[in-house]
Image: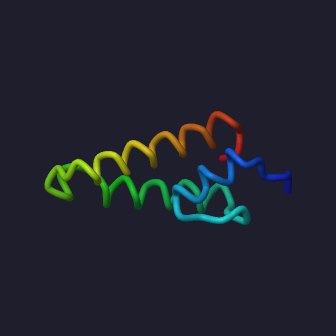
Amino acid sequence: RRAVRNAELKALHTLGLDEQATPDQIKSQYKTLIKRLHPDANGGSRATEDKLREVINAYDYLRTAGYC
């Protein structure tokens, strides 16, 4: 397993995971959070929309970095 950089660790923590998370766990957690934070599921709360944006950015970073 490769060493986890600070940016990757921050992205994993944003998804509620630790550095031991597997690619499958990352994808599963991402899908769970997207469903939970989607505006149709939470009444359009601004804070929840901001969290959704953070989750999407974290997953995109991990995917681009080849982590998942």
Task: Spot the residue most to the top.
Answer: 64
- Total marks drawn? 0
In this picture, is 28 found above or below 51? below
Residue 6 locus on image (x, y percent): 73, 49
Residue drawn where x is 34% and y is 46% of the image:
50
Q: Is residue 64 left or right of residue 54?
A: right
Q: In which quarter of the image is residue 24?
A: bottom right
Q: Is residue 17 left or right of residue 54?
A: right
Q: In this view, does 65 lie to the left or right of 59?
A: right
Residue drawn where x is 85% and y is 52% of the image:
3
Q: In this view, does 28 lie to the left or right of 25?
A: left
In the picture, the quarter occupied by the N terminus is bottom right
| Relative depth, front residue between 49 and 32 | 49
Residue 54 locus on image (x, y percent): 44, 45
In this picture, is 11 found above or below 32? above
Residue 44 locus on image (x, y percent): 17, 50
Residue drawn where x is 45% and y is 43% of the image:
56
Image colouring: rainbow
| Relative depth, front residue between 42 and 28 | 42
Residue 2 locus on image (x, y percent): 85, 51
Q: Quadrant of residue 13?
A: bottom right
In this picture, is 56 found above or below 26? above
Residue drawn where x is 40% and y is 58% of the image:
33
Task: Spot the residue most to the right.
Answer: 2
